[in-house]
Amino acid sequence: MESPGHGGARTALEAAGARVVGISVDRGGLSIENGSGRPRMIFVTPSHQYPTGRLMSINRRRELLALASRVAERG
């Protein structure tokens, strides 16, 4: 999950039993290079990130989709 991120979403995910890991947000959005492990889910707000209001760049969106594809292929 993005950090900073939407507190309500974090609360809901944790209440559902998820282990939420905060990943830093820079000018381009969620920085997947700062992540660790193999995520089972990624929560992002690509348009007008909350609370910073930044937009996730198209390159960062592509990187995120490529990561999701690699993780899905490994099962």
Image (tube, rainbow, N blue to C red):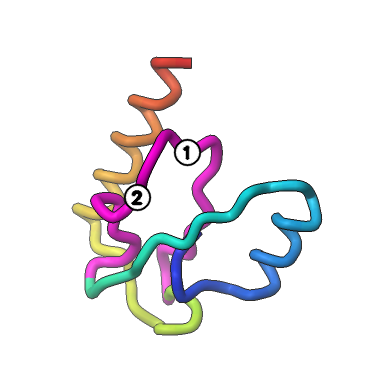
Q: Which residues are magenta?
A: 28-48
Q: Residues within 10 Å of mark 2 (few under 14, many from 20)?
A: some
Residue 21 in the figure: left or right of residue 14: left
Give percent across and percent down for residue 1. Answer: 50, 58
Question: Are discs 1 and 2 less than 8 Å apart at CB?
Answer: yes
Q: Amino acid at mark 1?
A: Pro
Residue at image mark 2? 35
Residue position marked by numbered label 1 in the rendering: 39
- For the residue pair 62 and 16, the one nearer the viewer reads as 16
- Callout 2: helix, strand or loop? loop
Residue 68: numbered disc: none
Front-lying residue, 47 or 71: 71
Report the residue at 31% width, 66% height from top: 29
Q: Is residue 57 left or right of residue 70?
A: left
Disc 1 packing (10 Å; few <14; some 14–19; many ≥20)? few
Counting from the top left corner in percent of width and height, residue 68 is at 40, 34
